Amino acid sequence: PNKRPTTSLLSDSVDYPAGIAWLFVWALTLTAIFFLQVDHPEITDRFANSTLDLINGHEWWRPFTGLFLHADLIHLSGNVLIGGMFCLLVSKSLGASVAWPLILVAGTFGNAIQSALHYPDAFASIGASTATFGALGILVGLAFIDTATTGWGFSLRKLSMPLLAGLILFGLLG
């Protein structure tokens, strides 16, 4: 059975399932949509996160739908494997039914902010990388909360790991 956190969001007393079933559904969904994109390339144009279509065209779904599109198998595999790892860590900390929707919301807002920052230039993006960064941001936020509630000693290690992972991922992906 799931244990609820008592004093710390990341304490060792929290033992949520990792959410493997959620990851499996996510990976299957991304893969199915990728192969649909291959057969119907117009899907990418219609659903990619696009600055001009979002802001000028009021196509509000684009920051969300762009998370599900990928340029090639390497792009897809990287997002499923690396992103999946961080999503499982968030699921372990918060529970899958909270973690996965929160990650999708973070990725969607990340795409919307990205579009706003690029406006008025024409800019488009696809992929679940913003959801991966959203998962990392959630982990860092949880580590900050944990550090603030339990002190800076041992919790500094919990804080440094997601920050270091985020910096490495940011360095690799730009």
Image (tube, rainbow, N blue to C red):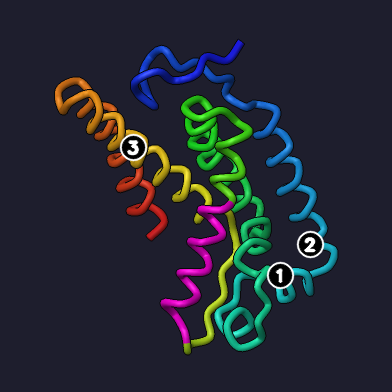
Residue ID at (74%, 55%): 34
Q: In whole angstroms, how far apart are the C-alphas of marks 2 and 1?
A: 14 Å
Q: Name the residue carrying label 2.
A: 38
In which quadrant of the rendered image does the C terminus lie?
Answer: bottom left
The residue at 64%/61% (across/down) is: 64
Check disc 2 and give the amino acid type.
Answer: Val
Question: Helix or strand or loop: what does disc 3 sit on?
Answer: helix
Using the image, determine if residue 152 lies above or below residue 144: above
Is 167 within the magenta? no
The residue located at (38%, 48%) in the rendering is 169
Residue 26 on image: x %, y %: 69, 41
Q: How far is disc 1 from disc 3 in space, using C-alphas?
A: 31 Å
Q: CA distance from mark 2 to mark 3?
A: 34 Å
Q: Please state the horizontal and vertical placement of residue 73, each as a whole percent of the image.
A: 66, 51
Residue 68: image tag? none
Determine the residue positioned at 30% across, 29% down: 146
Q: Position of residue 56 (x, y in %)?
A: 60, 88
First in residue order: circle 2 vs circle 1: 2
- The amino acid type of the residue labelled 1 equals Phe
Q: Are marks 1 and 3 in contact (CB under 8 Å)?
A: no
The single residue placed furthest to the front in the displayed view is 6
Residue holding disc 3: 162
Residue 119 or residue 148, whichever sits in front: 148
Residue position marked by numbered label 1 in the rendering: 47
Dot 3, how many residues are within 10 Å of its Cα: few (below 14), some (14-19), or many (20+)? many
Magenta segment, which residues? 105-119
Closer to us: mark 2 or mark 1? 1
